[in-house]
Each structure stands twice: as C-alpha cells, then as structure tokens.
C-alpha cells in the first residue's frame, strides 16, 4: 500500500526532502553522541547526508532525478550544512557536489548492487573527507598531521558512517525504487502495431 502511494511522489522531490532530513539527523546524531564521537583525540563525524545525496546514483535512479538536479540538491544541502555545522560557507557547498560528481564517475563502471553501491559510497566519502581536511588546512583552521588525520578522523568517521550505511541503505533504496517512474523516453512502439491499429480504423470506416 505504502509503495503504491509513493508512485505519486516524484523522485526529485523525495530526494530533496530526504537530503534536508539527513542534514538535520546528522546534527542530532552528533549532538546526542558527542561524548562518544568527539572524545579527544578522536573526531568521528556522521555524514548520513552524503549517503542520501548519493542515493540516486547508488540506487540506479539518477535518471529519475536528473544529474543537474542532483548537483543542485547537493549544492543546497551543502549550503545548509555549512550554515548550521561547518560555520564557513563554501566547504560543504562545494564538497557535496564534488562528491556527487566523483560517485557518478565511479558508479558507471559498476553494476547496481548493494556491494558496489557500498564501494562507490566508501570511495566517495573518502574523497570528501580528504577534500574537507585539505580545505580546512588551506585556510589554516586545521593543523592535524596527515597520519593523525587518518587515525583520529578518517578511520573513525568511516566506521560510524559504515554503520549508518548498513542501517539505512535498504530503507532508502526502497523509497527511491518505489518512486521510480516508467522510462517512456526509451519506450519503443512496433510500427506494425501502429499499422494494425490504422488498418482496423480504415476497415471500421467502411461499415
């Protein structure tokens, strides 16, 4: 019943709403688990929003959303993330569309299965975290050595987000698949079917 109702919701709208919800949930998770996630020297940041931003690619529904809207929503999600969490406009606002682009170029070589979706998500998240580290280092807001970044930020962040991936991917994939619409652009009608219909019409006009 629920899946049938979702057919009336366009995937693009679903995607935009889920990205905003995920940004909010990231803040909630970070706040509620701050004593565990950000216990010095460790800093493990939840990035459920990145998983949701990449879901059209990971679920094979990117044609439903369209690439341009994928970038627009990633840009908007990054802007909201920067305003509420990063505190510097431009880090996630650029990083989220960049991560979307990386995932799109990786996924084209893989089939649409959960394993390869996880591989694409993993590589894309690594790209974003590396970009984030370099961006903060460039503006002199991060003095963490590369080895310390890998041990105390990259690895813990990947671990907590792997848990989020395993918990949320199947449910998210169901939502995106449930809103998938028929691809009429590639729907072919046999010319013989058209001719048979026309012939029937001509015959019917004789009587």
Image: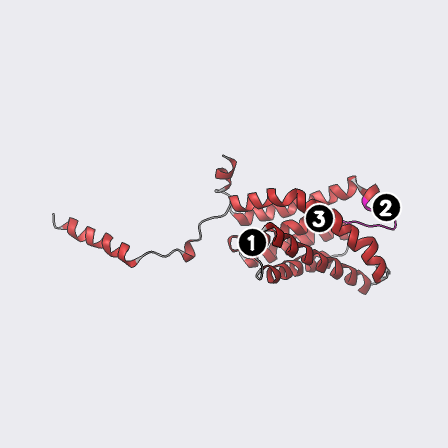
Q: Residues within 10 Å of mark 2 (few under 14, many from 20)?
A: few
Q: Position of residue 11 (x, y in %)?
A: 53, 48
Direction from residue 150 to residue 164 in the image, left or right: left
Q: Position of residue 205 (x, y in %)?
A: 15, 50
Q: How is the image coloured?
A: secondary structure
Q: Position of residue 45 (x, y in %)?
A: 77, 49
Q: Which residue is mark 3?
A: 162
Q: Residues within 10 Å of mark 1 (few under 14, many from 20)?
A: some
- Residue, far top: 1
Tell us which disc is closer to us: 3 or 2.
Answer: 3
In the image, what residue occupies the spot 66% across and 59% down? 99
Closer to us: 81 or 32: 32
Tell us which disc is closer to us: 1 or 2.
Answer: 1
Label located before the other in sequence (1 or 2): 2
Question: Compared with residue 136, is residue 26 higher up or lower down, i.e. above or below?
Answer: above
**Figure label count:** 3
Whether residue 120 is visible: yes
Q: Which residue is mark 1?
A: 112
* Residues shaded magenta: 37-46
Label located before the other in sequence (3 or 2): 2
Q: Main secondary structure of the magenta part?
A: loop
In the image, what residue occupies the spot 48% across and 38% down? 4
In the image, what residue occupies the spot 54% across and 55% down? 62
Q: Which residue is mark 2?
A: 39
């Amino acid at each position: 019943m629920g899946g049938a109702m979702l057919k009336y919701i366009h995937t693009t709208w679903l995607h935009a709403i889920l990205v905003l919800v995920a940004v909010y949930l990231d803040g909630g998770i970070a706040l509620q688990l701050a004593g565990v996630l950000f216990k010095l020297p460790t800093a493990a940041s939840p990035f459920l929003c990145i998983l949701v931003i990449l879901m059209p690619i990971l679920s094979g529904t990117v044609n439903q959303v369209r690439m341009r809207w994928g970038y627009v929503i990633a840009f908007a999600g990054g802007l909201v993330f920067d305003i509420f969490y990063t505190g510097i406009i431009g880090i996630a606002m650029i990083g989220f569309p960049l991560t979307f682009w990386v995932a799109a170029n990786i996924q084209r070589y893989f089939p649409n299965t959960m394993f390869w979706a996880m591989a694409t998500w993993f590589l894309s998240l690594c790209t974003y975290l590396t970009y984030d580290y370099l961006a903060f280092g460039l503006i002199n807001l991060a003095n963490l050595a590369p080895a310390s970044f890998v041990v105390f930020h990259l690895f813990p962040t990947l671990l907590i987000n792997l848990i989020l991936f395993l918990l949320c991917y199947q449910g998210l994939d169901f939502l995106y698949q449930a809103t998938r619409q028929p691809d009429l652009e590639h729907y072919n009608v046999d010319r013989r079917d058209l001719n048979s219909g026309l012939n029937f019409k001509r015959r019917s006009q004789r009587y």
